[in-house]
Image: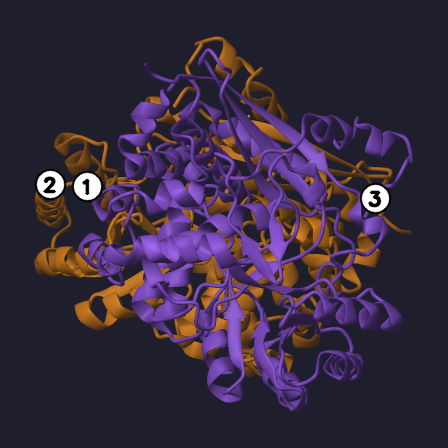
Chain colours: A orange, B purple
């Protein structure tokens, strides 16, 4: 019996988060966390569906919706079995099969975000068909099956299929031990909840204290506004969390290269573990220069790193200490796996970007796969956690003592409640009509 | 008296070029050259309009149209004088002023293509208001005025405003001499007309012979299909053009890094002047590696180089011999000027990408500015020319003995005939309804 994808439905879903300044940082002053939400409908008797989303922060989500529609023909009418029998070929096809569409990237921006929503929906459908969460689908695959899901174009100078196989085979025999460990203890996480720029001192203190009480040991602070203010808030956070817990900083791309170095030298007194996105996400050589000049403070980036070719170079150039792969900025899970394998080869820990809406749900699957099947290490690895919007998911993340507990429900953990999709549909859903909020710039 | 932009109108214009295989190459087998075409309407008594376009190759043009609409509020309601009084601030505002939209890039892909259409339309409007073609508007500006048009964010580690001023001041006193020279002799060009992959041997020979007869001395061949076929066609071209004329090769991104080196070592016997886009346009370190290993063959890239940060690194890494800036891939003329100035600092010649539809019309303005006001050199500089679709423009390029003759009509040379806009509107225009062509993948 085969599963034919009979239709692709796409929705513009937006949450009015700008009203509370949740998610405010130096570059993104007032985001409305949003999703270009894809449902792949099938002809199965039980109406099995594949769900996937790409994350945006509000305006422009409609452009991603248009992009998804332009790509729909790559999946509609195909069978799941046809796609999954050669997932690597499918991925190459959707990213390069229509050269007219490829021109709009390639492999970047709106088209790549849209690709992620569709590709991840296929993974969700596949995992549901197998009756497993995505992380378990991946860890149960053989190295050969996994490598067949990947397209190595443009990265063979850093990672060949043979090298990928060798990395995956290294820890095969001990997978079961790590799987059991994860089911018992979960995957270590850190919190950004206390660190947003828009919060008052009182709110920062309260959230930091609550975080400590809940067992968090890693905290992240947004920087990149006024440097004196950054220093003041770092001092407050250190007062609250002490010096044994880790403090990370995130500048969200606002500095130039030399400015990053100057500012981090001032913030060094607060012992930051890493500086995240100090400058343009495209500046590989800039990150390498910053890293050399502010050691031992680590450099982290990735949430805006748009494809495997950019990650390849960040690794080749020795530009990063932490690889913050994003589950929807890259063209879906296939490309994420390539980056996870390259990071393993170069010995750089993967600490996925999360937050927004749905990103925590996605990335727990990635980090579980990374630990169980690839790196077999938790050293310098923490998964971002933000306590926003989880109530909208059928299978929301479960955090216990600062750890992500592995999801059990089949799929990519990304399916939203039907009533959420109704209520937050933009611009017609009740969330947007009843309070008549403005969506103007 | 001020000029207020009262409306932005955007059209989806497509030319069915895939029917003839014009423009076929190793990556783009059947493009339909297209434009997301912007008109800025104003309140002037003579209905002055600013026209601009971004170039695509067919499907997905509707996504760029959606992106332009998402950006319209940055110009509608503003006065031209307000914008041009601080063009650098305007450019930063349209690329980063709405952080929700910036998330979709930043500075890349569909959103940046859309930005180019609008920004270039502002330049067209400005030049028309001044009664000059854009190149003349630029060369008549003082160094201070020019630098005020630029946003140096993310490039100050390679080029400061002070360095930009120094570069522009270097050749100020001799601008008039070079302007006269250009008006008399034009700017040297090369032709890709004979080299498309889809053409038969007979057609290649005929077009090469015609090119020689017309006075062309630079020819470009598409490569990257079957290597034996590439070799066979290189031999044919050398037979027709001899060994004194230059032969360039263009792989349109189909090779991996090591594959590029291997293939170019085989093609070296035909003495290629450059290899263009050997691999992923994002692979700065890859281009640097290829360049080191195939010298003295030059490396050229840029038509898919999506912003100034990428060009900065190509220059810093010593990855390119030729800088092929694109007039619509970058976010419009302001960003192009930054790249031209960085290339001047690093001593790399600028040979803009052209062809498609409207790109030749755009880039003649860039190269004239570069020669007259920046580099003051023609060494290793040639401007791409493709003999397609010029009949649709009010002010089509004029080629004389392999040289672009400077346009005289006010504006950015990019305005299309009203009947073209009617006829090639997609999907309703007659060009798309009368022959019922298919636009399916």
Disc 3 crowd rating (10 Å Cα; few below 14, some 14-19, many 20+) is few
Q: Find residue A229 and name its label.
A: 2
Q: Residue A30 — which label?
A: none
Mark 1 touching mark 3, by CB under 8 A? no
Spatial CA distance of label 1 from label 3 is: 48 Å
The answer to which quarter of the image holds residue B156 is bottom left
At a point 66% along the width and 84% down the height, the residue shown is B263
**Is residue B368 shown left or right of residue A362?**
left
* Residue B95 percent location from the top left of the image: 39, 39
Q: Is mark 1 on a helix, strand or loop?
A: loop
Q: Where is residue A42 in the image (x, y as percent from the top left)?
A: 81, 40
| Residue closer to the observer: B108 or B298 | B298
Q: Residue at horizontal 71%, vertical 78%?
A: B241
Q: In which quarter of the image is the N terminus of chain B?
A: top left
User: Which label lies toward us, 1 or 2?
Assistant: 1
Residue B137 visible, this angle: yes
Left or right of residue A169: residue B48: left
Q: Which residue in the protein does label 3 denote?
A: B440
Please tell me which residue is depicted at 50% across the width and 40% down the height of the picture: B408
The chain letter for the residue carrying disc 2 is A
Distance from the alpha carbon under mark 2 to that under mark 3: 55 Å
* CA distance for labels 1 and 2: 7 Å
The residue identified by callout 1 is: A225
């Amino acid at each position: 019996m085969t599963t034919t994808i009979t239709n692709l439905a796409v929705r513009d879903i937006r949450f009015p988060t700008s009203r509370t300044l949740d998610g405010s940082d130096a570059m993104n002053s007032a985001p409305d966390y949003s999703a270009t939400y894809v449902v792949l409908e099938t002809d199965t008797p039980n109406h099995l569906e594949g769900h996937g989303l790409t994350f945006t922060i509000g305006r422009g989500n409609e452009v991603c919706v248009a992009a998804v529609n332009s790509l729909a023909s790559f999946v509609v009418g195909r069978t799941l079995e046809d796609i999954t029998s050669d997932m690597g070929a499918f991925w190459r096809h959707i990213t390069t099969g229509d050269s007219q569409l490829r021109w709009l990237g390639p492999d970047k921006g709106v088209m790549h975000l849209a690709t992620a929503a569709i590709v991840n929906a296929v993974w969700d459908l596949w995992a549901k068909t197998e009756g497993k969460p995505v992380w378990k689908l991946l860890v149960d695959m053989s190295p050969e099956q996994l490598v067949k899901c990947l397209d190595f174009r443009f990265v063979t100078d850093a990672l060949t299929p043979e090298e990928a196989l060798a990395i995956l085979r290294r820890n095969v025999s001990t997978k079961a031990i790590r799987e059991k460990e994860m089911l018992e203890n979960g995957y270590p996480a850190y919190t950004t909840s206390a660190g947003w720029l828009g919060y008052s001192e009182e709110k920062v203190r309260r959230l930091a204290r609550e975080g400590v009480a809940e067992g968090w040991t890693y905290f992240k602070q947004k920087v990149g506004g006024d440097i004196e203010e950054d220093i003041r808030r770092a001092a407050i956070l250190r007062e609250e969390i002490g010096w044994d817990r880790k403090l990370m900083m995130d500048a969200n791309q606002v500095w130039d290269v030399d400015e990053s170095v100057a500012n981090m030298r001032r913030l060094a007194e607060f012992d930051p573990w890493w500086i995240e996105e100090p400058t343009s996400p495209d500046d590989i050589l800039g990150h390498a220069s910053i890293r050399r000049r502010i050691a031992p403070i680590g450099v982290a980036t990735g949430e805006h790193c748009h494809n495997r070719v950019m990650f390849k170079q960040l690794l080749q150039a020795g530009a990063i200490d932490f690889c913050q792969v994003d589950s929807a900025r890259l063209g879906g899970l296939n490309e994420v796996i390539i980056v996870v394998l390259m990071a393993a080869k170069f010995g750089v820990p993967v600490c996925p970007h999360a937050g927004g809406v749905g990103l925590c749900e996605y990335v727990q699957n990635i980090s579980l796969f990374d630990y169980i099947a690839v790196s077999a290490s938790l050293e310098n690895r923490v998964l971002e956690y933000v306590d926003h919007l989880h109530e909208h998911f059928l299978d929301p993340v479960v955090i216990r003592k600062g750890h992500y507990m592995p999801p059990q429900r089949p799929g990519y953990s990304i399916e939203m409640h039907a009533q959420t999709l109704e209520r937050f549909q933009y611009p017609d859903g009740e969330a947007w009509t009843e309070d008549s909020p403005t969506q103007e710039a």
